[in-house]
Structure formats: C-alpha cells, structure tokens
Image: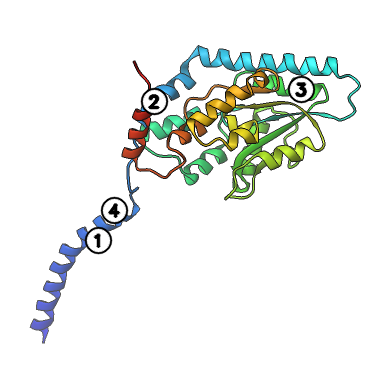
Amino acid sequence: MRSFLAHSHRHLSVLALVLLPLLYSLNAIAQAPTEPAQNGYIEGAVLWQQSSGERRALSYQAFALARMMLDRDLRMNRRLRKPRGVIVDLDETILDNGLNEGMQVKNHVNFNQKDWTAWINRAEATAVPGSVEFLNYAASRGVAVFYITNRNDIQKAGTAANLQKLGFPNVNDQTLLVQTDPKDSSKEPRRQSVGAKYRIVLLMGDDLNDLAKVFEDSKTVASRIAASDRFKNEFGKRFIMLPNAMYGNWEQAIYEYNKLSEEEKAAKRKKQLKSY
C-alpha cells in the first residue's frame, strides 16, 4: 500500500511539474493585453508638447487673445445684466498631461481608464502656460469660470485637488462639470446649462468638440474641416483653440470612430497622409 502511494505521489509530482508552467503561461496570456500598443508614432507630438518653446508661445498667445476678447466684451457691453461666464476644457487646455502621455509611449500602453484615474488621483498635471493667470484675471473682473470636462465622477475629487493646487479660481461642484453619463460624452447639455444663466463670452479647448455641438456631430475628417471653415469667423473671437497633437477627436475621425486593431489604425493613418 505504501509502495502504491509513493508511486502515485511520484506521478502527481511529475504531472504538477508539467502542468504548472502551462498554467502560469495561460494566466499570463489572460492578463496580458490582447495587442501591445503601437503608439510610437506620436512620440514626436509628445516631445513637441513637452519640450518646444513654440507650444508655450502658442499657449501664451491663446490666453493673451482671450484676455483681449474678454476686455472687449466688458467694454462694449457695459449695461449687460446677464452675468458673464467663460467655459474651459481641462486636459491640454488648462491642465498639461504630457507626463502621462510620455509614460504611455515609453511603456507601449494604450489609453485606459485604470491608468488614467490613477494619474488624475496623483494630481500632478501641471498648468498650461498662461492659463492660471488668465482665469484668475477673468474671476477678478466678476466673470464666472466653468470647467467642463469628460473626466468622470470617480475622477472629480482628484481633478478638483489638482486645479486647486495649481491656483485656478472658484473650483467647486457648481463650476466643475464632469461627465456623468458614461454612454454620452457630449458637452452640449452642460454648455447649455451654463448658457441658460450666463452670457458665455469665450469657449476654450484643445479639441473642436470642446466648443460646439456642430463639431461633436462632425464625425469624419472632411466634415470636421468643413465645420471649421464654416465657423472660421468665431475663432479668435468666441472660440479659442489650444495646441494638442498628442490625441483627440481629430485622430478618431481618421479611424471613423471604429474599434480597429493596431495594424488597421496604422493603415488608416498612412492612407490619410497626403503627398505629391
């Protein structure tokens, strides 16, 4: 009996030695991403955002223009009874997430909510050059500042902490308007809620979708360009854009808002390139 048990034990031990590596391998496959990110193509964009004086100059220029337009409205509409407001997007408009984008490129990681929430909760985004000064100036002139973002409720506390740490004015539940419906990323209802009570003097963003519904409804490269041309007289006056080539709806339009493999995305990007 003892000999039989010893023999069986030896067989089980050998079986375990054979199966354990296989189980570990299967577990690793299950936990690994289905496809490694091929996001090295945006390395230049991230480097430009992080390292160029030109990016800083464009940001200073945008906020200087915003101040000029705000002063113009204050001067020309002195008898206006409706209170004034300005609406700003957060990411790459007043908050700089270049460090997070750099992490993704270095580690070949695609955007995902887990990493994004962890980054937000660190509250380490820096201020886009000129943003803190402009928004504090607006607040000093009695203009309400509204922060409309597609960060969500879970990320709201970390977002507020980051904004307050950087010195942005009047950050509270009434002014920090996050995305509450995970199935609807439109900012239009939030813009309308602000517009019902305030005269919106300026809308500022790094993505056309930050500005108006017409851009949200434009889902192709051609339609987004056409919408920009249609509203060309609004830019520099009521609409003010900040530079961001790292990510945005401009790229999703190239992919036609479809879920594609990395190889398919690369093919779409290459096909979109124009040359002579």
- In this image, 1 relative to 36: left or right? left
The image shows residue 214 at horizontal and vertical percentages of 62, 34
Q: Can I make out residue 67 in this image?
A: yes
Q: CA distance from mark 4 to mark 1?
A: 10 Å
Label 2 SS: helix
Residue to which mark 2 is pinned? 43
- In this image, 115 relative to 78: left or right? left
N-term-proximal mark, 4 vs 2: 4
Q: CA distance from mark 3 to mark 2?
A: 35 Å
The image shows residue 146 at horizontal and vertical percentages of 72, 33
Q: Residues within 10 Å of mark 1 (few under 14, many from 20)?
A: few
**Quadrant of image for the C terminus:** top left
Residue to which mark 3 is pinned? 138
| Residue beneath the point at 24% across and 61% down | 23
**Quadrant of image for the N terminus:** bottom left
Label 3 SS: helix
Nearest to the observer: residue 115 or residue 5: 115
